[in-house]
Amino acid sequence: MINSHTDPDRRRILKVFASLGITGPLALDLAAQARARSSVEILKNAEAIRGEEFSEDRLEVINTALQRNLDEFQNVRDFELDDLIEPAPIFVSTRHAAPAIAVRGRSKEEATHGQL
Protein backbone atom coordinates (compact mmCIF):
# COMPACT_ATOMS: atom_id res chain seq x y z
CA MET A 1 0.00 0.00 0.00
CA ILE A 2 1.35 3.42 -0.95
CA ASN A 3 1.57 5.94 1.84
CA SER A 4 -0.24 9.07 0.66
CA HIS A 5 1.76 11.24 3.06
CA THR A 6 5.12 10.65 1.36
CA ASP A 7 6.48 13.06 -1.19
CA PRO A 8 6.04 11.78 -4.74
CA ASP A 9 9.20 10.74 -6.51
CA ARG A 10 9.91 11.18 -10.20
CA ARG A 11 8.73 7.67 -11.09
CA ARG A 12 5.38 8.18 -9.34
CA ILE A 13 4.91 11.58 -11.03
CA LEU A 14 5.57 10.07 -14.46
CA LYS A 15 3.11 7.22 -13.74
CA VAL A 16 0.42 9.77 -12.87
CA PHE A 17 1.15 11.70 -16.07
CA ALA A 18 0.97 8.48 -18.11
CA SER A 19 -2.40 7.62 -16.56
CA LEU A 20 -3.63 11.04 -17.70
CA GLY A 21 -2.33 10.43 -21.22
CA ILE A 22 0.64 12.75 -20.87
CA THR A 23 3.80 11.01 -22.05
CA GLY A 24 7.14 11.65 -23.71
CA PRO A 25 8.94 14.99 -23.62
CA LEU A 26 5.92 16.85 -22.29
CA ALA A 27 5.78 14.61 -19.22
CA LEU A 28 9.51 15.07 -18.62
CA ASP A 29 9.18 18.83 -18.93
CA LEU A 30 6.30 18.91 -16.47
CA ALA A 31 8.18 16.70 -14.01
CA ALA A 32 11.27 18.92 -14.30
CA GLN A 33 9.19 22.01 -13.52
CA ALA A 34 8.16 20.42 -10.23
CA ARG A 35 11.74 19.92 -9.08
CA ALA A 36 12.58 20.90 -5.52
CA ARG A 37 15.23 23.42 -4.58
CA SER A 38 17.96 22.63 -2.10
CA SER A 39 17.79 24.15 1.36
CA VAL A 40 19.76 24.19 4.58
CA GLU A 41 17.05 22.04 6.18
CA ILE A 42 17.53 19.34 3.54
CA LEU A 43 21.28 19.47 4.12
CA LYS A 44 20.77 19.12 7.88
CA ASN A 45 18.78 15.93 7.25
CA ALA A 46 21.51 14.66 4.95
CA GLU A 47 24.26 15.39 7.46
CA ALA A 48 22.28 13.52 10.14
CA ILE A 49 22.05 10.49 7.85
CA ARG A 50 25.79 10.68 7.09
CA GLY A 51 26.69 11.22 10.72
CA GLU A 52 28.48 14.50 9.97
CA GLU A 53 28.19 17.90 11.58
CA PHE A 54 28.62 21.22 9.81
CA SER A 55 28.28 24.75 11.13
CA GLU A 56 25.42 26.95 9.91
CA ASP A 57 27.88 29.03 7.88
CA ARG A 58 29.30 25.91 6.22
CA LEU A 59 25.78 24.65 5.45
CA GLU A 60 24.99 27.97 3.74
CA VAL A 61 28.13 27.65 1.59
CA ILE A 62 27.27 24.04 0.72
CA ASN A 63 23.69 25.02 -0.11
CA THR A 64 24.84 27.84 -2.39
CA ALA A 65 27.26 25.56 -4.24
CA LEU A 66 24.69 22.76 -4.53
CA GLN A 67 22.01 25.09 -5.85
CA ARG A 68 24.46 26.54 -8.40
CA ASN A 69 25.24 22.99 -9.61
CA LEU A 70 21.53 22.13 -9.82
CA ASP A 71 20.91 25.29 -11.85
CA GLU A 72 23.77 24.41 -14.21
CA PHE A 73 22.41 20.87 -14.64
CA GLN A 74 19.07 22.42 -15.56
CA ASN A 75 20.78 24.65 -18.12
CA VAL A 76 22.28 21.55 -19.74
CA ARG A 77 18.87 19.82 -19.74
CA ASP A 78 17.24 22.90 -21.29
CA PHE A 79 19.85 23.21 -24.05
CA GLU A 80 18.31 22.25 -27.36
CA LEU A 81 20.60 20.70 -29.92
CA ASP A 82 19.51 20.59 -33.54
CA ASP A 83 19.22 17.10 -35.02
CA LEU A 84 21.39 18.20 -37.94
CA ILE A 85 24.42 18.56 -35.69
CA GLU A 86 26.37 15.32 -35.78
CA PRO A 87 28.32 14.04 -32.78
CA ALA A 88 32.09 14.41 -32.87
CA PRO A 89 33.76 11.30 -34.30
CA ILE A 90 36.48 11.51 -31.65
CA PHE A 91 36.98 13.59 -28.53
CA VAL A 92 40.38 14.17 -26.99
CA SER A 93 40.45 16.34 -23.92
CA THR A 94 43.40 18.73 -23.99
CA ARG A 95 43.69 18.27 -20.25
CA HIS A 96 44.47 14.57 -20.63
CA ALA A 97 46.02 14.56 -24.11
CA ALA A 98 49.47 13.04 -24.56
CA PRO A 99 52.24 15.54 -25.44
CA ALA A 100 52.73 14.05 -28.91
CA ILE A 101 50.02 11.95 -30.50
CA ALA A 102 51.23 9.88 -33.42
CA VAL A 103 48.87 9.94 -36.40
CA ARG A 104 49.77 7.20 -38.91
CA GLY A 105 53.42 7.48 -38.13
CA ARG A 106 53.51 11.29 -38.00
CA SER A 107 53.97 13.46 -34.97
CA LYS A 108 51.15 15.69 -33.73
CA GLU A 109 52.86 18.79 -35.13
CA GLU A 110 53.32 17.20 -38.59
CA ALA A 111 49.71 16.03 -38.66
CA THR A 112 48.30 19.44 -37.73
CA HIS A 113 50.50 21.38 -40.16
CA GLY A 114 50.02 18.93 -43.05
CA GLN A 115 53.69 18.09 -43.37
CA LEU A 116 54.77 14.67 -44.55
Image (tube, rainbow, N blue to C red):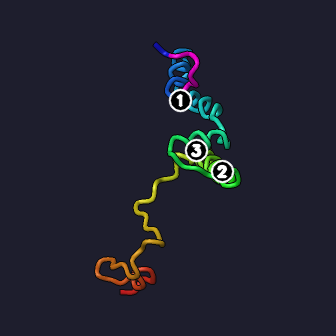
Looking at the rendered structure, the kind of residue marked 2 is Leu
The mark nearer the N terminus, 3 or 1, is 1
Q: Residue shown at 62%/52% (left/top)?
A: 54
Q: How many marks?
A: 3
Q: Say above or below: 3 vs 73.
A: above
Q: For this rendering, which residue is in front, 56 or 31?
A: 56
- In the visual, does 96 lie left or right of 20? left
The disc placed on residue 77 is 3
User: Which SS class for mark 2?
Assistant: helix
Q: Nearer the viewer, mark 1 or mark 2?
A: 2
User: Which SS class for mark 1?
Assistant: helix
Q: For this rendering, which residue is in front, 74 or 8?
A: 8
> Which residue is label 2 attached to?
59
Which quarter of the rendering shows the N terminus?
Answer: top left
Q: At which x and y percent is residue 110?
A: 40, 85
Q: Say above or below: 96 vs 12.
A: below
Prevalent SS, magenta region? loop
* Separation of residues labelled 1 and 2 (CA atoms): 26 Å
Looking at the rendered structure, the kind of residue marked 1 is Arg
In the rendered image, residue 49 lying in the magenta stretch gets the answer no
In the rendered image, residue 4 lying in the magenta stretch gets the answer yes
Q: Say above or below: 95 vs 85.
A: below
Q: Write the start and end of the magenta stretch as one range.
A: 3-10
Q: Say above or below: 43 vs 58.
A: above
Q: For this rendering, which residue is in front, 37 or 28?
A: 37
> Which residue is label 1 attached to?
10
Looking at the rendered structure, the kind of residue marked 3 is Arg
Badge 1 crowding class, 10 Å Cα cut-off, few under 14, some 14 to 19, many 20 or more, is some
* Separation of residues labelled 3 and 1 (CA atoms): 16 Å
